[in-house]
Image (spheres, helix red, strand yellow):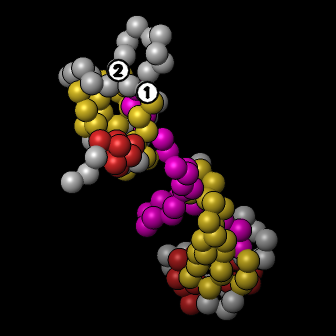
């Protein structure tokens, strides 16, 4: 059987997701990364739960519960989103590009994209010359 300290330590570092109920308002004060809703404390971000004990002289002796974001993730490209990329290499049938932004958010990781010859225009695809359409260093 676990003692109270182990239970508290386990609860201290529980992973939380937005909308997840953490506890009741009578037991906790909603802190950073949480909010109160219908007498419950609910997580508003993805992160780890931290319980901050009240100061001894505080009028409210409930602990404050926070959900802290571990590390903000950069933007990740998905099919159908608009990206900003820099052409790295041009080949006869495609251009290779490094993705710089997804929408208006910069990417943190390196993502590579490919512009195929058939994606340059919708008609006369076989007449597309990739070397006249793109140059290394172009921003698209």
User: Mark 1 packing: few (<14 Cα in 10 Å), some, or many (20+)?
Assistant: few
Q: Of helix, strand and loop, which one carries label 1? A: loop
**Mark with earlier residue (2, 1):** 1
Q: Nearer the viewer, residue 5 or 45?
A: 5
Residue 6 appears left or right of 56 = left
Q: Residue 45 in the image: x percent, y percent?
A: 41, 41
Where in the figure is residue 102, as x and y percent of width and height? 56, 57
The residue drawn where x is 23% and y is 27% is: 24
Residue under the point 57% across and 60% down: 83
State the image quarter where residue 43 is shown. top left
Front residue of this view, candidates 116 and 86: 86
Q: Is residue 72 magenta?
A: yes
Report how far apart the C-alphas of labels 2 and 1 lie in the structure: 7 Å
Question: At 62% from the left edge and 65% from the top edge, which residue is drawn?
Answer: 109
Determine the image quadrant of residue 115.
bottom right
Taking the image as shown, residue 109 lies to the left or right of residue 55, namely right
Rendering coords of residue 126 (x, y %):
56, 90
Give the magenta-colored segment's residue range.
64-87
Q: Which residue is mark 1?
A: 53
């Amino acid at each position: 059987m676990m003692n109270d300290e182990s239970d508290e330590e386990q609860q201290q570092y529980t992973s939380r997701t937005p909308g997840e109920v953490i506890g009741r308002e009578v037991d906790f004060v909603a802190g950073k990364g949480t909010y109160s809703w219908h007498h419950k404390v609910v997580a508003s971000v993805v992160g780890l739960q931290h319980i901050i004990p009240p100061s001894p002289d505080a009028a409210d002796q409930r602990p404050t519960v926070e959900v802290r974001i571990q590390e903000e993730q950069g933007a990740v490209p998905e099919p159908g989103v608009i990206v900003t990329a820099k052409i790295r290499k041009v080949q006869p049938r495609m251009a290779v590009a490094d993705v710089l932004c997804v929408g208006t958010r910069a990417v943190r990781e390196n993502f590579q994209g490919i512009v195929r010859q058939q994606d340059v225009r919708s008609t006369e695809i076989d007449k597309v010359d990739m070397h006249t359409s793109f140059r290394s260093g172009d921003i698209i």
